[in-house]
């Protein structure tokens, strides 16, 4: 960090510009109130303008009408321009109204301002323990000597055996209130920091997407070279330290077992009297679901990059087809020019007018005819009627009704299992309805089918017999 680097940061970095702004208290407090505090990822222009108008009205009442003379939408446009860069203004693909999101630079400045406040309790023990634990994991993870690893594992096993012996003897060591608060504050700061990291990861993916669009618009060489360069950059990001840690974090968080464990641990910790005395933020109870929502935004940015590449390939295929048609027309024009006076000798030799290509996968499958030809007739006695019971035994499962039940259950909860839905709405059509639920889960990209666990679904068929099916755990998510 030298003078030139700091001078460049002072001129270009949004966080530094926010700290130097004349209305920095308004900008920082409002962005924290609208986005960072409630963990809102995006807001429409009308909703954000309404929030800012309420804030400006209160400030003008307290400081005078000349304190903030401009309209709310003018402030928003200024905060989102290139000179300031505190908000990101964009149009979602399914809306014609602009939306806003806070930028990572502005969020870092607001976090730094929040850290300037006086803290009544400073966590120190938990941080030094975290340092020791991380150093221990690094050393153990890089040691190649089997004897050293075995010795360390035996030492930890001996510590566990000693602790078990003390508990059996009735000597249970319990954390005091100070140590509980120390570790809780460290956990809360780390959890909130992860949400800020997600915005920075998403910003990096957006910058990659912008660079890809610029290259596609200005590329003048072959398509293969462009695709090689684009995929090379994307592989470089995926294989970078940030990409690897983000992928490992996402895989860890997407595990249903980990989500259930986090929920259980958070509820147990927040119920402790020492933690309740701190009046913790209620959003910490569902912070892991906020992580999922923030990570999903980053994943959608990657999907948008893939769609951009697909559109580029489709456009290039259209141009190539047009070029082929131009070549064919040129051949036809030359053929017409020599039609009256063909050249001597063999003009062209072709073994076959067309290649005989027979691919096994191109053999058509059986398809039922529109009008079936039925030659067999039932053999019945003269006084016997044709049985028509099969016409009334048909079962129709309304998949839209099942989908509405799933959506209704997810309105109050972020996740719900298939067993819970069936418990609330017992199966009416037995196995056919259960198979329809599984089909909806397979088609929903947010649903999770965990084959490592199973649960039992019970119902009663139309004859009054109890039925039971054991299947993998199915989890529907918002």
Image (cartoon, grey):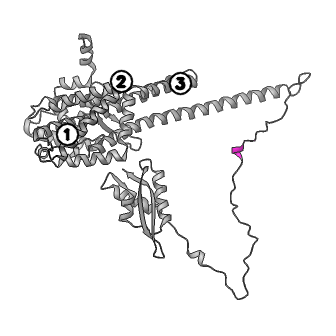
| SS category of the residue bearing label 3 | helix
Query: On the image, numbered disc 3 is attached to which residue?
Result: 228
Image location of residue 151, percent across then percent down: 31, 28
Marks 3 and 2 in Cβ contact (< 8 Å): no
Tell me if 136 is positioned left or right of 433 in this view.
left
Q: Is residue 392 visible?
A: yes
Query: On the image, numbered disc 2 is attached to which residue?
Result: 143
| Foreground residue among 418 and 289 | 418
Q: At 71% from the left edge and 27% from the top edge, which residue is drawn? A: 327
Query: On the image, numbered disc 1 is attached to which residue?
Result: 33
Magenta segment's dominant SS is: helix
Image location of residue 321, percent across then percent down: 65, 32
Tell me if 240 is positioned left or right of 320 in this view.
left
Q: CA distance from mark 3 to mark 2?
A: 38 Å
Image location of residue 280, percent across then percent down: 16, 43
Q: CA distance from mark 3 to mark 1?
A: 44 Å
Can you tell which mark lies on residue 276?
A: none
Tell me if 355 is positioned left or right of 60 in this view.
right
In the rendered structure, which segment of residues is drawn in magenta? 358-362
Query: Which mark is in front, 2 or 1?
Result: 2
| SS category of the residue bearing label 2 | loop
Marks 3 and 1 in Cβ contact (< 8 Å): no
**In the depicted structure, whether residue 453 falls above or below residue 300:** below
Image location of residue 430, percent across then percent down: 47, 67
Q: At 19% from the left edge and 39% from the top edge, which residue is drawn? A: 33
Disc 3 packing (10 Å; few <14; some 14–19; many ≥20): few
**In the depicted structure, whether residue 409 falls above or below residue 41:** below
Query: Which mark is in front, 3 or 2?
Result: 2
Q: Residue furthest right?
A: 345
Q: Earlier in the sequence, mark 3 or mark 2?
A: 2
Q: Is residue 156 magenta-colored?
A: no
């Amino acid at each position: 960090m030298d003078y030139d680097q700091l001078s460049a940061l002072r001129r270009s970095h949004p966080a530094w510009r926010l700290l130097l702004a004349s209305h920095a208290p308004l900008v920082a407090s409002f962005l924290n109130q609208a986005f960072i505090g409630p963990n809102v990822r995006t807001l429409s222009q009308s909703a954000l303008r309404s929030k800012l108008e309420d804030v400006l009205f209160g400030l003008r009442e307290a400081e005078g009408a000349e304190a903030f003379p401009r309209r709310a939408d003018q402030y928003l446009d200024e905060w989102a321009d290139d000179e300031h860069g505190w908000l990101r203004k964009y149009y979602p693909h399914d809306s014609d109204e602009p939306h806003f999101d806070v930028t990572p630079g502005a969020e870092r400045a607001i976090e730094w301002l929040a850290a300037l406040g006086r803290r009544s309790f400073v966590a120190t023990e938990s941080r030094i323990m975290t340092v020791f634990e991380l150093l221990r994991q690094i050393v153990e993870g890089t040691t190649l000597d089997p004897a050293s690893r075995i010795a360390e594992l035996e030492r930890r096993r001996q510590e566990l055996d000693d602790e078990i012996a003390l508990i059996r003897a009735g000597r249970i060591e319990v954390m005091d209130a100070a140590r509980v608060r120390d570790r809780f504050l460290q956990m809360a700061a780390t959890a909130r920091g992860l949400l800020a990291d997600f915005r920075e990861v998403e910003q990096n993916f957006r910058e990659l997407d912008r660079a890809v669009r610029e290259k596609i618009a200005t590329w003048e060489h072959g398509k293969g070279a462009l695709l090689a360069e684009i995929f090379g950059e994307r592989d470089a990001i995926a294989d970078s330290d940030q990409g690897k840690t983000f992928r490992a974090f996402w895989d860890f968080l997407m595990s249903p077992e980990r989500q259930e464990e986090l929920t259980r641990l958070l509820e147990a910790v927040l119920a402790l009297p020492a933690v309740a005395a701190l009046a913790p933020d209620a959003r910490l109870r569902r912070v892991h679901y906020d992580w999922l929502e923030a990570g999903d935004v980053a994943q959608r940015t990657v999907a948008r990059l893939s769609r951009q590449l697909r559109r580029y390939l489709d456009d290039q295929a259209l141009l190539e087809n047009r070029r082929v048609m131009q070549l064919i027309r040129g051949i036809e024009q030359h053929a017409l020019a020599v039609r009256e006076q063909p050249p001597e000798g063999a003009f062209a030799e072709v073994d076959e007018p067309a290649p005989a290509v027979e691919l096994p996968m191109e053999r058509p499958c059986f398809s039922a005819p529109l009008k079936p030809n039925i030659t067999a007739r039932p053999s019945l006695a003269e006084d016997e009627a044709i049985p028509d019971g099969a016409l009334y035994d048909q079962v129709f499962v309304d998949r839209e009704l099942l989908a509405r039940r799933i959506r209704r259950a997810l309105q109050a909860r972020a996740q719900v299992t298939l067993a819970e839905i069936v418990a609330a709405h017992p199966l009416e059509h037995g196995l056919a309805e259960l198979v329809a639920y599984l089909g909806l889960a397979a088609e929903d990209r947010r649903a999770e089918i965990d084959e490592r666990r199973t649960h039992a679904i019970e119902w009663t068929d139309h004859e009054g017999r109890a039925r039971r099916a054991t299947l993998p755990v199915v989890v529907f998510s918002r």
